[in-house]
Amino acid sequence: MQAIILAAGYGRRMRPLSDSSHKALLPIGSTTILARIVDGLREIDIDHLTVVTGYRAEDIERYLRERYPQTRLQFVYNARYEETNNIVSLSMGLEQMQLDDDLVLVECDLLFEPGLLGRLLTRDANIALVDHYRTGMDGTVVSVSGGHVQQVFPPHVQGPDFQYADKYKTLNIYRFKRDFCTNTLAPLVKVYADRVDANSYYELVLGMLANVPEQRIAAEVVAGEHPVEC
């Protein structure tokens, strides 16, 4: 498999720490958030990484090249990172990478036990890691039926009367089949990013596909092992 790491964002929630460092390079013990992610990917034998950069792009590239000289690295620079959202970064990454295997998508600001990524290997399918919603889990949530993602609810549709009791939080870690990426996800994400709304989330596109039987995404419930988004 290959992996794409979205690392373009500024990290406003982590100011003032992110004013002088990319959020993914902030120290966690003797390592960094980004190194924990890459080490976890390497544990499941992924050593082909595409990293979409923006804020402090040179710092990210230098760090990864120095720390992982044997890893196959490709960097894609999103010059519009300050004015767009992650749908643009994902579109650019998918467009510029040569996808010859299934793809793992991870966002760069997640703290999790590396072994969690092994849950992506439980079946040969499109997979989203999810957990039962609990207070404090901000961001996109989904409904699940029959072991698959049924509906996707980005933050902007979660009004004051939104019901969370039966929802699951996406953990921003996915596995996508190669053909799904090439023939379905990449074209749809590009159209949406280029022509509809560059300031939206890629989960909107996943929501459009949730009820298309041949494009379904399995929901792998991690039951309390959820990452912390920084």
Image (cartoon, grey):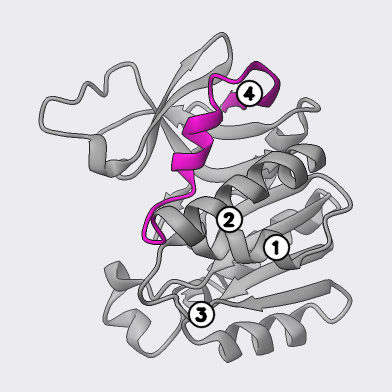
Foreground label between 4 and 1: 1
* Badge number at residue 216: 4
Foreground label between 2 and 3: 2
Determine crowd level at label 1: few under 14, some 14-19, many 20+ residues with C-alpha closer than 10 A.
some
Q: Answer whether labels 1 and 2 touch (C-beta < 8 Å).
A: yes
The answer to whether residue 136 shows anywhere in this view is no
Could you tell which of marks 1 and 3 lies nearer the N-terminus?
Answer: 3
Residue 197 screen position, x and y as percent? 39, 56
The residue indicated by pointer 3 is: 54
Could you tell which of marks 4 and 2 lies nearer the N-terminus?
Answer: 2
Q: Write down the quadrant of residue 127 in the picture.
A: top right
At label 4, which amino acid type do we have?
Answer: Arg
Distance from the alpha carbon under mark 4 to that under mark 2: 20 Å
The C terminus: image quadrant = bottom left
Distance from the alpha carbon under mark 1 to that under mark 2: 8 Å
Distance from the alpha carbon under mark 4 to that under mark 1: 22 Å
Residues in magenta? 197-220
Asked whether residue 207 is drawn in magenta, I would say yes
The residue indicated by pointer 1 is: 95
Q: Answer whether labels 1 and 3 touch (C-beta < 8 Å).
A: no
At label 3, which amino acid type do we have?
Answer: Gly
Q: Residue at x 50, y 40 (%)?
A: 205
